[in-house]
Image: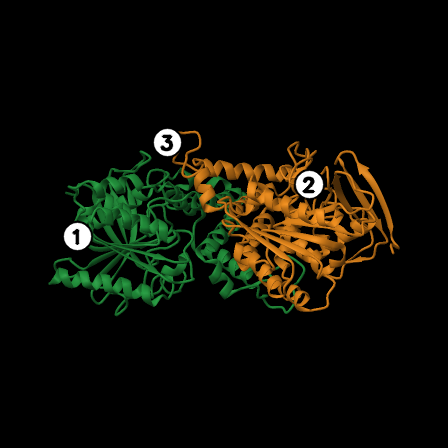
Chain colours: A green, B orange
Amino acid sequence: MVDYGIKIETNLKLDCEIAYFSKANFVIDSGYKFDDFKIAYKTFGKINNDKTNVIFICHALTGDQFVSGKNPLTNKDGWWDRMVGPNKPIDTNKYYVICSNVLGGCIGSTGPKEKNFITGKPFGTEFPSITIRDIVKAQKYLIDALKIDKIFAIIGGSMGAMQVLQWTIDYPEKLLNAIHIAGALKHSAQNIAFHEVGRQAIMNDQSWNKGNYYFENTKPERGLSVARMIAHITYLSDDAMHRKFGRKLQSRDIISFGFDADFQIESYLRYQGKSFVDRFDANSYLYLTRSMDYFDVVEKFKQLIEYPVTNNQHINYLIISFTSDWLFPTRENKQIVDILNYNTRKVSFTEIETDKGHDSFLLDEPEFDKTISGFLDSKYKKLIG
Amino acid sequence: MVDYGIKIETNLKLDCEIAYFSKANFVIDSGYKFDDFKIAYKTFGKINNDKTNVIFICHALTGDQFVSGKNPLTNKDGWWDRMVGPNKPIDTNKYYVICSNVLGGCIGSTGPKEKNFITGKPFGTEFPSITIRDIVKAQKYLIDALKIDKIFAIIGGSMGAMQVLQWTIDYPEKLLNAIHIAGALKHSAQNIAFHEVGRQAIMNDQSWNKGNYYFENTKPERGLSVARMIAHITYLSDDAMHRKFGRKLQSRDIISFGFDADFQIESYLRYQGKSFVDRFDANSYLYLTRSMDYFDVVEKFKQLIEYPVTNNQHINYLIISFTSDWLFPTRENKQIVDILNYNTRKVSFTEIETDKGHDSFLLDEPEFDKTISGFLDSKYKKLIG
């Protein structure tokens, strides 16, 4: 029963849809209330008549709604173009895929760089602190607005995996299948530490100006770039870095005896930092990393699964981890599997052997692709009979 | 045969000795020549008549000459006070311990914050790029100035371990025993990456001012603090961080929904960053991290050890690693052992079981202490018969 205003418009510049909610009375964990907010989203494939083919994809920290096809802002392929599209592992000839930019993001959804509907000015650090639960709650508003009763499968990696878990806790009745990739029941101390250093780099940048840089000539590019570089190291494995870069020099045969990028790994990281600032908002980075740090559903998830009469018994879980992922290592993914198995729930678990680190879920890993398509297709066959 | 000027003075403020070299014709790897330079150092214990009890300690990246006793600048215990002193594992009742501040450092030795003897102004980024080999060469000047013919044992951890290896390559005839702790034959791509991000944080700080901040009111404290925070994460293990901090909140029962330090790990890192800037020079940090990045003696060490007639056959090596050290993991320390063993050289190897990460060599690890004192004492007994 929807008693708030919903308006859906196509945004030509962003090449996606935007759902505007008004009088929504959307109260988040901090106690802040959004009456008006918007969620930018993109869909791929066609919804079938009985709406049983919906796949909802939750993006990671720096992802966006442009899962597949061209990203109109970067003019590059979408972040999971390899995985999502016609005849791809998540086959849009068969499934109707929805992906929305998270609350607090910077690609069209309500977030720190967007106008506060009350003041008419960008939120900046007036934006309220948000949690993964809030992000998921906003997605639920969207799913309701689209009048989708059941999500066939919800899928996400990293911060997206956190959203997947949160969905199974808060709205299990909406889900049939849940694919959780390279995540954990809680953010670890080491992960919080890396995020904290990234935030300090941003907030220490004088151009950050306490978050009020939207009307200035400069933005905290340097700080954001350093934050991205730090994070990027954690997305790769030591072995992958060694294989890809080793101690190879950049464009010289000899070292420069200076602070230019002598080693290829240095230029690579600098490039990663620089290209990131063109597409991402520094305040969003602060808010979203914070939401990940706050994530801890260990107790809630256990309670939910251990309690014999719950409305999430029907969910089929697929948990995937990667051997060389040291940010969300197998042992942390395995905790979820153990809780589910111990309580005889329906769960499949696959650890993919790869040296590509946490980023493996974005990269070419044939076994990973097969695991996902196999799981989806077997469940879909069962569903449609 | 010393044909350059040497003057040794006691510096009361620094509570150590400073050796001034003039007309030294000290040519470093980059081709730059120091005619005048100075090395600050401190000694502990008494040298015996035949000078056979000298232990030379090489400090790590942010270490200094204040190994034992009080550090006059921080008013805290020296960085290895636990290890070095009367009746301690490195017993100054028995041994004469020397530790000098590295070339490029900031505690009295010639480095970017010190006056260029030619211009009379601080070097800043006019300071030449240096290598571990240059650092060791400067130490050799000091050892010669002190008229020490043989070093009974050279010891160092981390960047200090790199110096130990370099000594065994360049001046094996001066050494009897070498203790290499938590190091490697080369700096890995991941380690270079972490250093590069730290340097970017410093150089992105507007107060860095291209290295010319010594006459300004501000210095690049924010950048240096972020660099230190990044590095500090790499010095700890995931397990140690989890055990020490976990997801414990700082001084609240509930989260703040903001960017203050909610978690204890955050306050801890911020404290580490802040206290570091009081005692360390940002430019020194740039130069010394760079010298570590350039370190790669894989080929040289192999050649030296494989060549049957060398002047380093007599050296007894002790290689120590820590199970939870992911910055200089056991496998990298083990490479040194393998090369030595393969060529039937004298080497002992110990891997210490601990969850404290790379920093273990600075912390209370009884087995580690026993390994060092046992090795030293057995070799010393043999020596004095």
Q: Nearer the viewer, mark 2 or mark 1?
A: 1
Crowding around mark 1 (Cα neighbors within 10 Å: few <14, some 14 to 19, many 20+) is some
The N terminus of chain B: image quadrant: bottom right
Contact (CB < 8 A) between labels 3 and 2? no
Query: What is the CA distance from the residue labelled 2 to the residue labelled 1?
Result: 63 Å
Q: Amino acid at mark 2?
A: Glu
Task: Give me the chain letter of mark 3.
Answer: B
Q: Nearer the viewer, residue A136 or A105?
A: A136
Residue, disc 1: A150
Q: Position of residue A352 (x, y in %)?
A: 35, 61
Say which element carries label 2: loop
Residue placed farthest to the left in the image? A385
Q: Amino acid at mark 1?
A: Lys
Task: Give me the chain letter of mark 1.
Answer: A
Residue, disc 3: B254
Residue, disc 2: B216
Q: Amino acid at mark 3?
A: Ile
For residue B199, above or below residue A27: below
Q: Is residue A154 left or right of residue B88?
A: left
Q: Nearer the viewer, mark 3 or mark 1?
A: 3
Residue placed farthest to the front in the image? B385
Q: Nearer the viewer, mark 3 or mark 2?
A: 3
Q: Nearer the viewer, residue B40 or A166?
A: B40
Query: What is the CA distance from the residue labelled 3 to the residue labelled 1?
Result: 35 Å
Query: What is the CA distance from the residue labelled 3 to the residue labelled 2?
Result: 42 Å
Number of labels in the image equals 3
Q: Nearer the viewer, residue A279 or B220?
A: B220
Say which element carries label 1: loop
Q: Position of residue B45 (x, y in %)?
A: 75, 38
